[in-house]
Every structure is written in structure tokens, then in C-alpha cells.
Image (tube, helix red, strand yellow):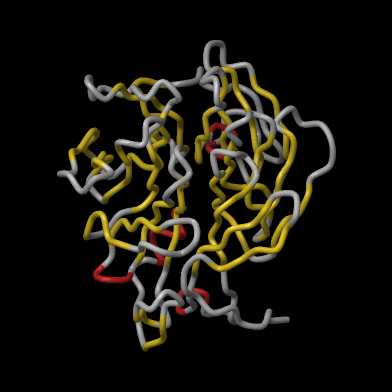
Amino acid sequence: MLVSAILLLFASVGCGFEAGEQVTFDTMDADPDWSPNGQLIAFVSSRGGGGIYLIRPDGSGLHQLLRGYASDVDWSPNGRMLAFTRADGIYVVPSDRGRARRVLRGPHYSLPAWAPDGRRLAIVKDEPDDSTALYVVELDRHSPRRLLPRYRGGIGDARPGSPAALSETEPAWSPDGREIAFQAADGYIVIAHVGGGRRREIVAGGAYEPAWSADGRLIAYQCEGELCVTNADGSGQTRRLAQDGGDPSWAPDSRRLVFEDYVYGGRNYFSNPQSLSIIDVQGGGARKLTFGPKLPATP
């Protein structure tokens, strides 16, 4: 998601949106999140001066909810609020165009994720030792506390106590709120019990941006630039669903995913467009949700 936030700063020449809106060739649509009732998808975009947009899963009804820089958008469980990151902290905004309210102040917070109870947000905090850690904040208290006990072991090639081994980012709650999946070290997907901090690795290396399905069975994630899905209990084989995709979000029926559809056009990645697509987890066949031409893969 950090890359997505950087990409939103870029814009250039003209092309068209499939539903009729004119957008620039370098338009960046990112950080999609499916609403709990399944009727809308929120995302951040560089179009129209930048901000948070809402669109129906069939591609209709596109409109801007909030203008200005934003990233890391996440729906509340009741669908009434959206949490997001700005340069000066974590915010929430009503999904019906109300006024945004800051929950946490400071540039060192990011990636808010609503707990299933709707009263708390897991957030990522930059630590003084250059690691990142998961914290939780209750919306009526504004005082974050560490979500998991400090990890003492190593992970992958990262030695115990190193910033890489300690780092926790990209939180995704289990539907019952008892566990949380996150990205650790250099592309490990880890699940930890929120109460005691007990951990298990379900994907070792090259895995980023986990998303837990609403039925609790599956975790989707970016696997080295592709879209993958695996069983939440770590069993079975990983399935690759789409090339050049990441940052997935589940539909409430746990049958579809919306994801960032990347375009790689040589070394100058930051000048290329990025769009959103939807894919059926069982049947495949990704379809475009927002504008963004696919360029031939570069050898």
C-alpha cells in the first residue's frame, strides 16, 4: 500500500474511463475495499484532484466521496464509516459524505483495519528502531496500545531482534476477531492470536498484503506481483489467480476479489497506469472495474 500511496502523486496525458468519465493515461486507482453489504467498492485515486471514490461492482455509479490525498481505505463492519490514512494521521469519514475526523495524529501511523466489533482499529506504527508494529486504538480514546507482544524470534533470513524480524504491517483481522494476519519480514504472511500473541507462518517469502475472507477459510495476498489465495489454516496448495495483481479485498460472499491491476512497462514503473479488477475465486476470468490499459509484459 505504500507504493500505492506514492503512485497517487503522478498524472499526465488523456484517455477515457470505460463508464464514460475522462481520465488521464497515468490515472492511479488503488487500495480497493469491498463494502460489508457488497453494494459498493471504495478506493483511492489520483483522478479529479485525488481522493476516495465509491463505485458499484458492475462499474456504475462512480463518484467521489472525499477530495484530497488519501490511502489505505477500509470500511467499518457496519458500512457507515471508512477509515483511511493521510500524511498527518489516521482519519474516519462517514460513507454518506460527512466530515472526516482525525483519530490519530502523526505521520508515523498508517494502514488502519477495522476490528470486527467496529469499535477498534488496528494500525501500523513506525518504531524508533526502524521496524513497524501493530497497534490498536479505540475510536473514543485516541490512545494506541501495542496489539501483540514484542516478538523475540527470527523469521526467514532475519535474525532475532532485527528490524526485519520485528516488523509487522498490513493487518487483516479474522472474522471472529480472535486472530490477525499480517505481513512480516521480507514477505512472510503470519497469523497471530490477539490474546496471547502465539504465531504461525502460513506463507514463507514473497507474500504481501494479506486479506482474510469473510467466511474465515481463505487468505488472499500479493505473491511477487501476482494475486494468490491460500487456506487460512496453512493447509493445501497456494493458487495463483491473476498476473500483475495485488492488494486484494474480498466480497462479503467470499467468492470474489477486487484487486489492484498493475501495469509494468519497463523500468519507469511510476509513469504507468494502475486500475482495479474483479475476479471470481473459483472461476477466474478477471474483468476491469476501472480504467487502466494493460500493456504487454516486458521481458
Residue 7: image location, x then y, percent: 41, 67
Q: Nearer the viewer, residue 231 or 9?
A: 231
Q: Quadrant of residue 243?
A: bottom right
Q: Position of residue 125 (x, y in %)?
A: 38, 35
Q: Residue at x 43, y 52 (%)?
A: 41
229 lies above or below 277: above
Residue 91 on image: x %, y %: 25, 40
Q: Is residue 181 left or right of residue 19?
A: right
**Residue 106 spot, x, y in % from top left:** 24, 40
* Residue at the image position 66 percent from the left and 40 percent from the top: 188
Q: Please, is residue 201 above or below residue 109 in the view?
A: above
The residue sitting at 43% across, 56% down in the picture is: 56
Quarter in which the C terminus is drawn: bottom right
Q: Nearer the viewer, residue 239 or 207?
A: 239
Q: Is residue 40 left or right of residue 80?
A: right
**Quadrant hosting residue 50:** bottom left
Residue 128 in sight here: no
User: Residue reaching furthest left?
Assistant: 99
> Residue at the top extreme?
196
Q: Is residue 118 visible?
A: yes
Task: Give the farthest residue toward the right.
Answer: 236
Q: Residue at x 22, y 21 (%)?
A: 140
Q: Is residue 188 above or below residue 67?
A: above
